[in-house]
Amino acid sequence: MNAQLAPIFQLSRQEKLQLVEELWDSIAQEESLQPLAQWKIDELIRREEAYQKDPSTALSWEEVKASILSRHA
């Protein structure tokens, strides 16, 4: 065990959960500050163009949600 992290293991379960939550929030915030990778931008553009050509191919949030929930029922 890393000696610097040893005090963490002395925390209560609730304190550990709080620490994990705060760490996760910190990671998510840092990630949101990162620029999108070019391949992600290209994919978003491709999808937008496909939608503009034929909007009927898109699904509403309700349809997507129902599909996901039906797989886990």
Image (cartoon, rainbow, N blue to C red):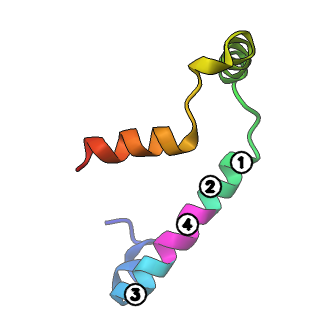
Residue bearing mark 4: 23
- Residue 31, image x and y in percent? 66, 47
Residue 23 visible in rendering: yes
- Disc 1 element: helix
* Mark 2 and mark 4 residues within 8 Å of each other at the beta carbon: no
Q: Which residue is mark 3?
A: 14
Q: Give the Cα distance between marks 1 and 3.
A: 27 Å
- First in sequence: mark 1 or mark 3? 3
Identity, as a three-letter code, of the amino acid under mark 3: Gln
Q: Is residue 61 above or below residue 3?
A: above
Label pair 2/1, CB-CB below 8 angstroms: yes
Q: Which residue is mark 1?
A: 32
Q: Secondary structure at mark 2?
A: helix
Q: Which residue lies at the image location 72% right of the left edge and 9% below the top edge?
A: 53
Mark 4 residue type: Leu
Query: What is the crowding at mark 2: few (fewer than 14 residues within 10 Å), some, or many (at least 20)?
Result: few
**Three-letter amino acid code of the residue under disc 1:** Ser
Residue at numbered disc 2: 28
